Each structure stands twice: as structure tokens, then as C-alpha cells.
Image (spheres, rainbow, N blue to C red):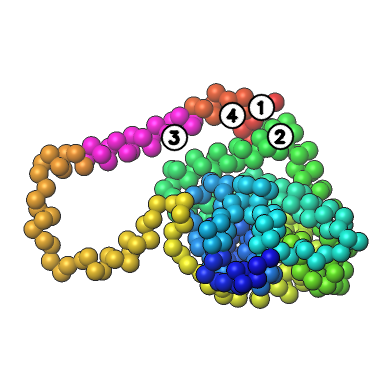
Amino acid sequence: MDDERVEDAQEIVLVARKGGFGLPTACPVCLPVYCYLRFAKVNFKLRIDRSNPDSDHIPYVEYGDYVALNNEKGGVLEILNEENIIQLDSELSKDCFSDWVSTKVMISTWLAEAVQYELWVACDSSIADYIYFSDLPWAIGKVLHWNQSRAVKQLHGITKLNVTEKEEEIYRKANLAYNALSAKLGNEEFFFEERPTSVDALFLAHAAFVINALPETSLLRSSLVKYANLTRFVETFKGDMLEASCSSSQTASPFEASSSSVPRTKKSKQSPKPKPKKRERTEEEKSFRRRAKYFIAAQVVSVLIFLTVLGGMGDFGVDDDDNDGLAYDD
């Protein structure tokens, strides 16, 4: 690993979704990368992407001219490790390697799936809407939320007939994971060899999100807080890892339309009196602008109608007599 390059704070940038619930980023997929960089004691900039709420390339890390996207090569953490950019696990002994792998997989699957289920199916829509869609127009946000919720149900094979069984299975696996993690951690500060690894980053991000973002009525949250050593783990690192300030920037990412300069230049472009140029629009120009607005509105309505019809024609149709609210048939 090239230590000189890694230590250059100007070269490492984490692009993530916005913060909330007392967390630097409220996205459960972005937070593990943030914790990983903090555990690695790397100086980095945090940029917030507000224009790609349903994109799977977020989070991503910019490292000089190199970009590690979340939807490539197993995710950002795998890329950082494989490319020898930032490694937390390189010094692990061979004796604990198999245990470390199984623990990491358990957090990345069972616990990640449980959070996904709570966020998009079990809990009300307000939490997910705040994290992903609060910066979008209401109608677009509702469509995207419906589409994501439908995708999660399909991913887990949830239908109106098996929802109870699927839910029990998800929470059963989560409880087993918490029990195993509690036994593994014991009274130690870290999970493996008295030093931070990617397992610590993954679990800290998971537990911090569950405790801070999910409501008290959450079954997943209730299961987690039963384990005193796991909650202690979160409290131990929350102040240093999640609340300590790091270099951050709210500038737009390369994947979004750059609009960050608009509020900064507002005052310089304002004048105390209206200029005559504002009165020079002809009736033809005004008519064109009105038609453009109508055209955009018509396109939005068309998208909404298309998605509604598409959902109704799919294999997983809505059953009006189904009280559980799931939109899937067998």
C-alpha cells in the first residue's frame, strides 16, 4: 500500500447519501464505508449526493483518478482492499481467517437483509423517504419508494400468502446473528485480535443505524438492545467514529447535475431594481415557456401512469382484498 498517497486527504473522497438521525450518513449502505475509513484513520472528504436516490453506484470512493463504485467488484470495501488502497484486514492471522470470513458474511447477509426488510416493508415509509427521497418532488418520491418496496419483496420472495413465514425467517436469522456476535465479542473491544477490521466497521454501521434510525417499535431494534455488550460496542465508538467531525464537502458529485453553484452566486447576481431586460420577452417567448412547463408536467404524469399500468400487468398484481398491503401473488 502506498502510504504517502493514502495519507493525502485531498485524494480520498467518500460520496454518500445525506446524514440524519445523528449519523453522518443515514444510508445503511453508505455508513459501513464511512466507518471503515474512520477505523483506518484515513483523512477523507465526505460529499453528499442528493440527485441519485435509487442508484446502486452510491456509495463510492474517489481516490485520485480512481473511483471505487459500490456496484462493482463486490462493493467499495472489497475494492479498497483488493486494490491495496486502504486495508484493515491485511494483518489478520490465518488462525482466525475462517471465523472472520463467516462473521463478515453473516453481517453482510442476515443482518443487512433484516435492515432492508424493516426499511422497505415492516416500518412506515417516513424513514426511507427521508433518507432517499426527501429532496425529490413528492410524486416522484412516492413512485420510487413503491418501486423499491416492490423490488425488496420480490428479492425476498415475499407474497401475500407467505409474508408471516418470511418475516419469521428474517428475524430468526437476525437473532441468531446477534447471539453469535455477542458471544464472539464478549468483553473485548474489537471482534478479532484486539484491532479493528472490516467486521467492526460493518457491525458498527449496522448497529448504529438500527439503534438511531429505526423506531422503538422495531423488532430488529428490540432484538439488538437485548445484548449489553453489543450496545456497549456502539456507545464506545459512536462519539469518536460517528460524531467526530471529518473534512466534509457538500459539493455535487460527478454523477449528478452540478447545481451547487446556484445558491452561492445568488447574491452577486441580484440587483436592487428590476432591469429592463426582464420586460423584453415577447408573447411568443412567453408562450414557448408555458408550453415547456406543460410538456414537463405531461412527461411526469406519463411516467406515473406507465409505472402504475406496468405494476398492474406484472406477475405480482395488487389484490384489493388483501389486508396485509403486499402487492404480490404467487
Vertical arrangement, residue 201 with respect to residue 7, above or below: above
Which of the two labelled residues, at mark 1 and mark 2, occupies the earlier sequence position?
A: 2
Q: Quadrant of the C terminus?
A: top right
| Disc 2 target residue | 157
Which of the two labelled residues, at mark 4 and mark 2, occupies the earlier sequence position?
A: 2
Secondary structure beneath dot 4 equals loop
Q: Residue at x 66, y 76 (%)?
A: 240
Check if mark 1's residue and mark 3's residue have beta carbons within 8 Å.
Answer: no
Which of the two labelled residues, at mark 1 and mark 4, occupies the earlier sequence position?
A: 4
| Disc 3 target residue | 304
Report the Cα–Cα distance between label 3 and label 4.
Answer: 16 Å
| Of 118 and 188, the residue lying toward us | 188
| Of 266 and 231, the residue lying toward us | 266
The disc label shown at residue 282, or none: none
Report the Cα–Cα distance between label 1 and label 4.
Answer: 8 Å
Residue 256 in the figure: left or right of residue 245? left
Q: Amino acid at mark 3?
A: Leu
Q: Main secondary structure of the magenta part?
A: helix
Q: Residue at x 41, y 48 (%)?
A: 137
Secondary structure beneath dot 2 equals loop
Check if mark 1's residue and mark 2's residue have beta carbons within 8 Å.
Answer: no
Q: Amino acid at mark 1?
A: Asp
Q: Quadrant of the N terminus?
A: bottom right
Check if mark 4's residue and mark 2's residue have beta carbons within 8 Å.
Answer: no
| Disc 4 target residue | 318
Which of the two labelled residues, at mark 2 and mark 3, occupies the earlier sequence position?
A: 2
| Disc 1 target residue | 329
